[in-house]
Image: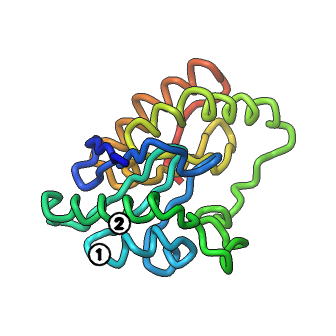
Amino acid sequence: MFIETETTPNPASLKFLPGQQVMPAGSREFTNDEEAAASPLAEALFALGDVTNVLFGRDFIAVTSGEGVDWSALKPQVVAILLDHFISGAPLFAAASADFKVPGEDDEDLGDSPEDADIIDQIKDLLETRIRPAVANDGGDVLYRGYREGVVFLKMQGACSGCPSSSATLKNGIESLIKYYVPEVTEVRAA
């Protein structure tokens, strides 16, 4: 088995491609040891001590290191853990935590109005078909958090959550695209 590695726009994050499916759908982000306990793989990555974020995507794992960590030393350790995991066929999630809450799932509801259902459907369709695939190329994900009075609230994850260019991606890329296709949208904000 060979694991490819790609850089991301976030210098603290690398994207690892195991050449097989990681998640059947969606993504799962882990931002600390406690959340990582739901996944033996995430737990092993956090146990390295220098990892601050892990994102499982459809066909990749994005790993973010702490400030000042040298990737030349950390990268081989991450690759070794990933190889061990995928070669062994170990489960991605611990059976005991199969019903765990996905970080961000319980975020406060922003109170989408039923009268905005058509607009919200258009926004969600754009997220699924155009935005999320593009953001995944950079080792991240973006989650819909709400729509209120012309403002779309999104949460950036993985390599995108701490990236120096994430605000530019959100404003210049995502906001422009959504506003073009959904004229009711006046702004996109990070949630």
Tag 2 secondary structure: helix
The one nearer the camera, 8 or 165, is: 8
Q: Can you identify the residue that label 2 sits on? A: 81
Q: Quadrant of residue 166?
A: top left
Q: Earlier in the sequence, mark 1 or mark 2?
A: 1
Q: Residue at x 58, y 31 (%)?
A: 186
The relative height of residue 177 versus residue 13 in the rendered view (above or below) is above
Tag 1 secondary structure: loop
Q: Residue at x 54, y 66 (%)?
A: 90
Mark 1 residue type:
Leu
Asked if disc 1 and disc 2 are in contact, CB closer than 8 Å, the reply is yes
Mark 2 residue type:
Ile
The one nearer the camera, 53 or 160, is: 53
Q: Can you identify the residue that label 1 sits on? A: 48
Left or right side of 112 for 52 = left
x, y percent for residue 4: 31, 43
x, y percent for residue 56: 50, 55
Badge 1 crowding class, 10 Å Cα cut-off, few under 14, some 14 to 19, many 20 or more, is: some
